[in-house]
Amino acid sequence: MRKKMRPVLRLAAIMLTALAVAAQTPNAAPNNFPAIQGLPGPLTWQHAPASWKIDNNQTLSITAGKGTDWFASPMGDEPTDNTPRLLFKPAEDFVLSAKVTVGFQSQWDSGALVLYVNDTVWAKLCFEMTIEKQPTIVSVVTRGLSDDNNSIAIKGSAVYLKVAKAGQAIFFYASEDGHKWTIIRAFSLGATPNLRAGFSSQSPVGDGCTSVFSDIRYISKRVDLWAGQ
C-alpha cells in the first residue's frame, strides 16, 4: 500500500514546489489578469512582454524585447505585429490618459497608448525616438496599411498622452505638464463594438525598451473632444 502511494506523493510534492516558485516570482505569467486602479477589468496581454510590473495597482512598467514593432508599412514591407500590449475593454465613450516615461536607447523605441479593433484596424499614440534621435509625439492609424505621422518634439524622457472617444470620433492629445493639452490627431476607426484600449512598448531596431505609465486616468463618459474634457 505504501509503495502504491509513493508516485502520488511525489507528484503532489512537485506540484507544491512549482506553486511555491510561482508565488515567489511577481508577475510571472503574462495572463494572470493584472489590475490597475480605475480601469475596468479584466486586463489581458496581447503578446507577452520581456518583463512587466504594476506598483501599488497604479503604475505600469512594460519592457518590450528586441525587435518588437507594430506597423503595416505603406511601402509594401511585411507587416510586423509583436509588441507587448496590455488591453482592456473601455466604455463606448471614454477618456484614457497617462504620463509616459520611456527609457530611450535606440531609434523608434517607444511607449504608447493603443486602440485595437482587429489585426488590420488599430491605432497608437506614441512617445517615440525618431530617426533624428529626437523624442517626439508620433501617431499611427492603421486600416490595412499604417498612416504614420510625426508631430511635436519633446525635451526629456516623459510626456502626457491622452485618447478620447465620442461616438465614432477619436482624438489623440499630448501635454508636457498634464494640464494644457494639444490635439495631435482626429480620426475614426468606424464602428468598433470590440474595441480594446491599453498600453504598449516597442523596440523595433534596439535590444529592448522599458516604458512606464503613471498617473493613469480613465473616465467612461462622452466629452467635448475639442476641449478633451
Image (tube, rainbow, N blue to C red):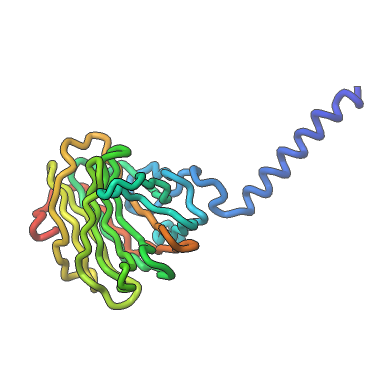
Residue positioned most to the front: 76
| Residue 120 position in % (x across, y down) | 28, 39
Q: Nearer the viewer, residue 93 or 100?
A: 100
Up the image or down, 116 lies above or below 176; here it is above
| Residue 166 position in % (x across, y down) | 13, 46
Q: Taking the image as drawn, is residue 227 in sight?
A: yes
Quadrant for the N terminus, please: top right
Q: Which of 72 and 38 is in front in this view?
A: 72
Query: Is residue 98 found left or right of 23 in the rendered image?
Result: left
Quadrant for the C terminus, please: bottom left
Q: Taking the image as drawn, is residue 103 in sight?
A: no
Q: Residue at x 34, y 68 (%)?
A: 129
| Residue 74 position in % (x across, y down) | 25, 48
Splitting the image into 4 quarters, where does residue 163 fall? bottom left
Splitting the image into 4 quarters, where does residue 185 fall? bottom left
Query: Is residue 151 found left or right of 134 in the rendered image?
Result: left
Q: Residue at x 39, y 59 (%)?
A: 58
Query: Is residue 143 found left or right of 215 in the rendered image?
Result: left
| Residue 69 position in % (x across, y down) | 39, 53
